[in-house]
């Protein structure tokens, strides 16, 4: 169990759960409900778009934390960091042929790819990311994506796979205001249990 947590990279997000998410915030209800459903038995891909601060990463981490709790093997990857890792480990001139982390990213039963589309990276790293996504597409492996970009800013090969309705029923667009701009009293009022 500890080991599953260690390899998940979820430490920084351990408090981002469904319980700590305020589902009453305007604009988040549908994504929250779908995320909860997805976490019951993840199948296919789960895709969330939306501006900064609307709760995409929180919901993605909530899915991951819930499955980790149920002993799934989960990996939370922030896309720009993942690409840095791949670049440093396997740059075109590197001799490393096998990397445990890269292998995990390809095949872990649940992968979170947080912040897709912000990667300002080399063609080589972009290709690596595409290969990972394509592998998970071909193998139909459960994957959660978040992005604050517009669809046309995503690698079209990746976006096309995300749009396969057999694998991903809908793209959730979270249209809410930046939660970080709420005052503390506003947050507390929202967090008070309702009856
Ligand atoms: N509905 C919500 N209830 C509780 N906290 C929220 C909610 N939406 C966002 N937050 C918090 O606001 C911050 C920004 O949210 P985050 O999920 O990182 O946004 P995004 O990934 O969409 O940019 C995080 O600390 C997150 O926990
Ligand atoms: Mg985020």
Image (spheres, rainbow, N blue to C red):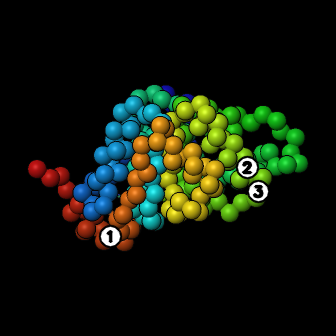
Judge the density around disc 3: few (<14), some (14-19), many (≥20) Cα neighbours within 10 Å: few
- Examine the image and state in which quarter residue 65 appears: top left
How packed mark 2 is, by other alpha carbons closer than 10 Å (few <14, some 14-19, many 20 or more), is: few
Q: Badge 1 local density, few (<14 within 10 Å), some, or many (20+)? A: few
Viewer-closest of 108 and 142: 142
Real-space CA distance between mark 2 and mark 3, rounded to the nearest whole angstrom: 6 Å
Label 3: which residue? 123
Q: Which residue is mark 1?
A: 182
In terms of secondary structure, where does tag 3 sit?
A: helix
Give coordinates of residue 95: x percent, y percent: 87, 40
Residue 127 tag number: 2
Label 3, label 1: how far apart the Cα atoms are:
39 Å
**Is 162 placed above or below 182 here?**
above
Distance CA(mark 1)–CA(mark 2): 39 Å
Q: Nearer the viewer's eye, disc 3 or disc 1?
A: 3
> Ligand 1: does it lie within 8 Å of the C-beta at label 1?
no
**Which is nearer the N-term, disc 3 or disc 1?**
3
What residue is at 45 percent from the left and 65 percent from the top? 51
- From the viewer's side, name the closer residue of 134 and 58: 134
Tell me if label 2 and label 3 are in contact, CB under 8 Å: yes
């Amino acid at each position: 169990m500890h080991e599953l947590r260690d390899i998940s990279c979820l430490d920084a997000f351990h408090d981002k759960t469904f319980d700590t998410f305020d589902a009453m915030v305007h604009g988040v209800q549908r994504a929250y409900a779908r995320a909860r459903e997805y976490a019951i038995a993840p199948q296919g891909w789960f895709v969330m778009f939306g501006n900064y601060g609307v709760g995409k990463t929180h919901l993605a981490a909530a899915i991951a934390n819930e499955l980790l709790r149920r002993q799934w093997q989960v990996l939370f990857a922030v896309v720009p960091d993942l690409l840095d890792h791949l670049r440093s480990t396997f740059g075109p001139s590197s001799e490393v042929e096998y990397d445990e982390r890269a292998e995990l990213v390809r095949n872990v039963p649940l992968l979170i790819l947080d912040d897709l589309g912000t990667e300002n990276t080399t063609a080589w790293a972009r290709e690596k990311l595409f290969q990972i996504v394509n592998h998970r597409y071909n193998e139909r492996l459960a994957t959660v994506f978040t992005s604050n970009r517009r669809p046309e800013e995503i690698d079209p090969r990746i976006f096309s796979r995300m749009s396969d309705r057999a694998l991903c029923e809908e793209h959730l667009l979270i249209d809410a205001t930046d939660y970080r701009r709420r005052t503390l009293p506003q947050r507390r009022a929202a967090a008070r249990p309702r009856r």
